Amino acid sequence: MARHAFFCLDGHTCGNPVRLVAGGGPLLNGATMLERRAHFLAEFDWIRTGLMFEPRGHDMMSGSILYPPTRDDCDIAVLYIETSGCLPMCGHGTIGTVTMALEHGLVRPKTPGRLMLDTPAGPVAIEYREEGGFIEEVRLTNVPAYLHAEAIEVDHPTLGRLTVDVAYGGNFYAIVDPQENFRDIADYSASQLVEMSASLRTALNAQSEFVHPLHPEIKGLSHILWTGEPRAEGAHARNAVFYGDKAIDRSPCGTGTSARMAQWAAKGRLKPGDNFVHESIIGSLFKGRVEKAVEIAGRPAIVPSVAGWARLTGLNTIFIDDRDPFAHGFQV
Ligand code: PYC
């Protein structure tokens, strides 16, 4: 019996929580972050569920654990932990992790203003703006994003027939654009969106397989991106992203923004150099940009970048006590 201690920096990126585990994380084996992620899921997933789910976390909780990099070209490695599992990549999590790690000296950049992250999805380049010891903005240049499938027809139990595109931006997203049976996220509350999303995700995964063409370990449609008309000045589009079992992202969602930029680029609505400002359900903004056009296994793809801000909300030493019947967390 033990009481395990985790030293966490708690914060949020544009409204969505980030719990950075700065001490107490397990040693992991693996030559790549995908292999280390598999080791964590096999042996240490109780740390994720204990820190993310109630009573220590909540439905939206999301975070990361820092490791030495597995690649010479990176400064630090990041394992993403979340209510949904260990994502290959998380945009809001990256912006929050980088902000808090830099502000607390957990990582020392070789070149001021720049960092290279080793993530399970691949290397992610960071540029940040610091003012007076605080990080004011982080821009991540993501792994390549692409439109995976177009116009998939699916029957939804309450909305009826829907047509969705599926795009990859570090995770697979079903993108629900305006159509006969869905107009705009403005017509629904967050809890209605959660209810609508779970059944849509189940139906889509039952009828198709979503596998990354270069990294077959990255598979499964995990997120639903519902769209809406922008409200904030300067925003090009609004969205609400569903993840885990009960969460609607409060931030504009970094990997979702990347996936949506790839979808727009594939349809000729964005080209390299174009900006794309994405608004969240609470009105916060990510500044996206199409950096360049590339290919993934012969498919047209883009390299997207996404910028946003994060704030530390507190330092939190969290115990997981083996005697606690809820040591590994619960969901209701
Ligand atoms: O920002 O990429 C993101 C993200 C994924 C899930 C929640 N946020």
Image: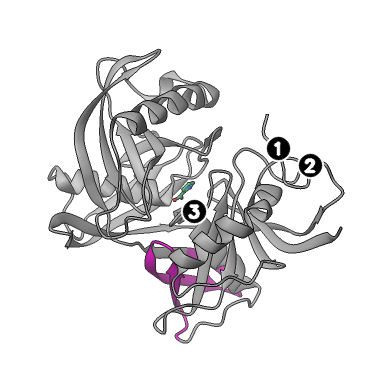
Residue pointed to by mark 3 = 92
Reply above or below: 84 against 199: below
Q: CA distance from mark 3 to mark 1?
A: 24 Å
Q: Is mark 1 within 8 Å of ligand 1?
A: no
Residue plotted at (52% across, 27% down): 190
Q: Which secondary structure lies at badge 2? A: loop
Residue plotted at (75% across, 46% down): 56
Residue pointed to by mark 2 = 326
> Dividing the image into 4 quarters, which one contains the C terminus?
top right
The boundaries of the magenta stretch are 111-137
Q: Which secondary structure lies at badge 1? A: loop
| Mark 3 Cα shell of 10 Å, populated few (<14), some (14-19), many (≥20) | many
**Which of the two discs, 3 and 1, labels the residue nearer the N terminus?**
3
Q: CA distance from mark 2 to mark 3?
A: 28 Å
**Which of the two discs, 2 and 3, labels the residue nearer the N terminus?**
3
Q: Is residue 56 magenta?
A: no
| Amino acid type shown at disc 2 | Phe
x then y, percent, for residue 243 = 49, 39
Q: Which secondary structure lies at badge 3? A: helix
Q: Main secondary structure of the magenta part?
A: strand
Residue plotted at (55% across, 78% down): 68
Q: Is mark 3 within 8 Å of ligand 1?
A: yes
Q: Is residue 120 magenta?
A: yes
Reply above or below: 50 against 1: above
Indicate which label's residue lies in the foreground, 2 or 3. 2
On residue 330, which mark appears?
1
x then y, percent, for residue 304 = 29, 58
Labels 2 & 3 near each other (Cβ < 8 A):
no
